[in-house]
């Protein structure tokens, strides 16, 4: 068998890994490339392999950089099943419908503001394409729940462990028999941060693993503790309250938004922060909050207890306001601070957050608060790196707002947790580090080699194929 890396290879988006077992082709994830617009558009516009040749897809979780090109896969001729946990299917359904809508809106906005000689753009896929794709989903519960492997062929079966990254996220373990020899290949997907509010800790893989494909997003970073982050958050919010600032939080609608809401709820209830109005300006986040309620069996126990206390729920409390319509969203521009707006997309690559940034980035009293990883080439990355001015929706803006960044609310394991997780696996022969930029991988690989001297470690490039 062999494996080819078609994304999240020396970068953190576009996750797509193709395993070929004697002609049977399994695609792990089918994610959207994000980042430099022209480059991402070119990479996303067509899949790098014939879609009709793929026999099965196993999806690790519902973030767009892991599931965002599934509608394109079906549009280009894929006929098989897309295996994922029931929660991932619900999450991905919302994410993909939202992605189609954002692409349609952004395309319209772009086409309405065309300059001379600029060609009109087309969305990558539409809401109809998403609807056509949905019947391909095959709900596959976590192994702890079903106690069953899922058979793909007589020689290939797989199971899903909880990755603790976002609701429904999984670690995929494949068992492949070739010429009487059994090999185990595991793919971490994105692996969670231990002790994350709401989610369970990542599960340990019980079987010996021969080949591991591991994410390495924060391979060069140790997160400070969540308690220190909470203290910083208290000081940012208290200051904002005094200065009547608007706080703009670009956030994935999924994962960090819910964790941040959960923490803000705790801090408000304990009187650590004033009752600041918090607008969740994302219809998607409101939908995802419902997915959380539907899949409450997947929370950790502490959160479950929070839910069963009478009165407010972790994701719904008095000063939290979900805005649904575009009109409600626009009305936020006319309000004066202090308040917080949490809005997608997390890397400022699209969605309503762009309009809030446009309206506030030049205001010295405003605060832009990042809570997640900002990939190279994204607007979010440019802002945290201090680029000034920046281009938003085709116009230049001066950055006068204060920019703050929290890595601690990350949904990813840090260097120490990754090292601990990978080196706890038995009999590892090969490790492929993906979902990582070269700087992170270069820092991480030698540390891992120290722990696992007889394991080969690779950092594949886009399009690299390895015989396994
Ligand atoms: Zn993710």
Image (spheres, rainbow, N blue to C red):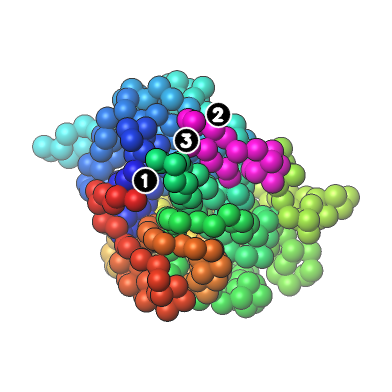
Residue 88, position as x, y percentages in the image: 57, 40
First in residue order: circle 1 vs circle 3: 1
Magenta part of the protein: which range? 142-160
Query: Can residue 319 be seen from the camera position used here?
Result: no
Q: Residue at x 56, y 67 (%)?
A: 424
**Residue hosting label 3:** 155
Foreground of the two, 120 or 77: 77
Q: Residue at x 43, y 31 (%)?
A: 56
Query: Can residue 460 be seen from the camera position used here?
Result: yes
**Residue hosting label 1:** 17
Disc 1 crowd, CA 10 A, few/some/many (<14, 14-19, 20+):
many
First in residue order: circle 1 vs circle 2: 1
Q: Residue at x 52, y 28 (%)?
A: 137
**Residue hosting label 2:** 138
Q: Residue at x 37, y 76 (%)?
A: 446
Residue 26, position as x, y percentages in the image: 40, 37
Residue 190 part of the magenta-drawn span: no
First in residue order: circle 2 vs circle 3: 2
Left or right of 278? Residue 6 is left
| Circles 2, 3 touching at the beta carbon (< 8 Å) | no
Q: What is the distance, in whole Å, between disc 2 and disc 3 at their CAs?
A: 20 Å
| Circles 1, 2 touching at the beta carbon (< 8 Å) | no
């Amino acid at each position: 068998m062999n494996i080819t890396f078609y994304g999240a290879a020396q970068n953190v988006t576009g996750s797509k890994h193709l395993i070929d077992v004697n002609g049977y082709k399994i695609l792990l994830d089918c994610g959207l490339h994000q980042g430099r617009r022209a480059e991402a558009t070119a990479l996303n516009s067509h899949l790098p392999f014939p879609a009709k040749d793929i026999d099965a897809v196993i999806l690790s979780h519902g973030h767009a950089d892991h599931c965002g090109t599934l509608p394109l896969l079906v549009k280009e001729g894929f006929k098989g099943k897309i295996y994922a946990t029931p929660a991932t299917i619900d999450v991905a359904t919302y994410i993909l419908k939202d992605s189609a809508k954002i692409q349609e809106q952004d395309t319209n906005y772009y086409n309405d503001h065309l300059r001379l000689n600029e060609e009109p753009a087309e969305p990558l896929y539409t809401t109809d394409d998403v609807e056509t794709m949905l019947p391909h989903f095959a709900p596959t519960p976590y192994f702890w729940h079903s106690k069953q492997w899922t058979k793909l062929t007589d020689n290939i079966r797989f199971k899903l462990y909880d990755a603790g990254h976002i609701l429904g996220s999984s670690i995929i373990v494949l068992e492949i028999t070739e010429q009487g020899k059994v090999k185990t290949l595991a793919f971490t997907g994105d692996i969670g941060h231990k002790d994350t509010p709401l989610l369970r800790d990542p599960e340990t893989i019980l079987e010996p693993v021969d080949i591991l494909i591991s994410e390495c997003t924060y391979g060069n970073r140790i997160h400070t503790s969540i308690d220190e982050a909470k203290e910083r958050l208290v000081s940012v919010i208290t200051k904002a309250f005094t200065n009547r600032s608007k706080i703009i939080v670009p956030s994935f609608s999924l994962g960090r938004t819910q964790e941040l809401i959960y923490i803000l709820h705790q801090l408000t209830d304990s009187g650590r922060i004033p009752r600041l109005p918090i607008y969740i300006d994302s219809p998607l986040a409101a939908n995802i909050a419902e997915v959380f309620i539907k899949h409450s069996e997947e929370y950790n126990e502490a959160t479950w207890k929070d839910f069963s206390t009478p009165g407010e729920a972790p994701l719904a409390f008095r000063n939290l306001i979900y805005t649904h319509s575009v009109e409600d969203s626009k009305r936020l521009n006319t309000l004066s601070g202090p308040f917080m707006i949490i809005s997608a997309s997390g890397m400022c690559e699209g969605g309503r957050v762009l309009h809030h940034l446009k309206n506030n980035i030049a205001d010295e009293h405003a605060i832009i608060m990042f809570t997640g990883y900002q990939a190279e080439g994204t607007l979010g990355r440019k802002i945290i790196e201090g680029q000034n001015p920046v281009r938003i929706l085709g116009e230049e803006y001066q950055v006068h707002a204060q920019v703050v960044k929290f890595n601690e609310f990350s949904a990813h394991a840090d260097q120490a947790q990754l090292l601990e997780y990978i080196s706890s696996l038995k009999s590892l022969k090969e490790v492929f580090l993906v979902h990582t930029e070269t700087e992170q991988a270069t820092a991480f690989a030698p540390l891992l080699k120290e722990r696992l001297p007889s394991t080969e470690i690779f950092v594949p490039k886009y399009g690299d194929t390895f015989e396994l």
